[in-house]
Image: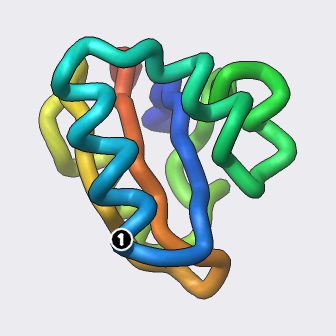
Amino acid sequence: MKSAIVRHILVKDKEMAEQLKKKIKAGADFAKLAKQHSTCPSGKKGGELGEIKKGQLVGPIDKAVFTLPERELHGPIKSQFGWHLLEIKFRMD
């Protein structure tokens, strides 16, 4: 079964997600921003979700994790929980 090592930031609105993405692309620390802004419990761990198996995350996020390129910042991606920024560290088969 496929799995991936992922970290993410979850915020309530797209505007905030866009602002955080710009900061990260400009060199800001992903983990620090996750701790400050993410509404997901993983924010306390710098956004680290750990090893995720295919099917564990909500639909649009699961699809993104297993189809988008690794080692890049993705998002904002909408789910029923809000707006996500994702970093797919690597995938395993």
Residue 62's x, y, as percent? Answer: 45, 59
Q: Please state which of residues 76 and 59 is positioned toward the viewer in this rendering.
A: 76
Residue under label 1: 15
Q: Please state which of residues 4 and 83 is positioned toward the viewer in this rendering.
A: 83
Q: Is residue 38 above or below residue 42?
A: below
Q: Please state which of residues 81 and 23 is positioned toward the viewer in this rendering.
A: 23
What count of labels does the image hold?
1
Q: Quadrant of residue 10?
A: bottom right
Q: Is residue 11 above or below residue 80?
A: above
In the picture provided, is 27 more to the left or to the right than 91? Answer: left
Q: Residue at x 47, y 28 (%)?
A: 4
Residue 40's x, y, as percent? Answer: 76, 52
Q: Residue at x 72, y 29 (%)?
A: 35
Mark 1, secondary structure of its residue: helix
Q: Residue at x 40, y 49 (%)?
A: 85
Q: Is residue 20 above or below residue 91?
A: below
Q: Quadrant of residue 93?
A: top left
Residue located farthest toward the bottom when viewing the structure as drawn: 80
Q: Residue at x 32, y 46 (%)?
A: 66
Task: Report the amino acid beneath label 1.
Answer: Glu
Q: Please state which of residues 24 and 91 is positioned toward the viewer in this rendering.
A: 24
Residue 80's x, y, as percent? Answer: 60, 86
Callout 1 crowding tier (Cα within 10 Å): few <14, some 14–19, many ≥20: few
Residue 82's x, y, as percent? Answer: 57, 76
In the picture provided, is 63 more to the left or to the right than 38? Answer: left
Coloured how?
A: rainbow
